[in-house]
Amino acid sequence: MAATVKIYTTDWCGYCSAALRMLRSKGIEFEQIDVDGDVKMRRWLVEKTGRTTVPQIFIDGQPIGGFTDMRALDERGKLDPMLWPKAA
């Protein structure tokens, strides 16, 4: 069973597009939340993650960072066990 993944994005963000492609390539279903122009949601993201940038990716409710953070986890072999905890 796959983890629950939420990704906070904007339409104009290249890193957001890259993160979405990566998740799709791994066969992961995710909830995409567009925060463009949503001041309240952006403020919540800063409080939760300490970051002002997008994308912000959450796996099973835990923030893992943005695209480069997710890619680094993947390169170290740590992303798939997070995305597929029952299979790991």
Image: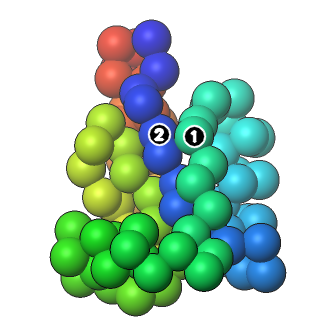
Residue picked out by circle 1: 31
> Looking at the rendering, which quadrant does residue 49 occupy?
bottom left
- Which image quadrant: the C terminus? top left
Using a 10 Å C-alpha cutoff, classify the residue at mark 2 as few (fewer than 14 neighbours), some (14 to 19) or many (20 or more).
some
Question: In the picture provided, is 26 more to the left or to the right than 55?
Answer: right
- Which image quadrant: the N terminus? top left
Kind of residue indicated by mark 2: Val
> Looking at the rendering, which quadrant does residue 81 occupy?
top left
Residue picked out by circle 2: 5
At mark 1, the secondary structure is strand
At mark 2, the secondary structure is strand
Q: Are marks 1 and 2 in contact (CB under 8 Å)?
A: yes
- What residue appears at the point 69 percent right and 29 percent down from the top-left corner? 27
Disc 1 to disc 2, C-alpha distance: 6 Å
Q: Is the residue 58 above or below the residue 34 in the image?
A: above
- Percent position of residue 3, x then y: 41, 27
Q: Is the residue 50 above or below the residue 66 in the image?
A: below
- Percent position of residue 75, x then y: 51, 59
Question: In the picture provided, is 59 more to the left or to the right than 39?
Answer: left
Closer mark to the observer between disc 1 and disc 2: 1
**Residue 31 or residue 44, whichever sits in front:** 44
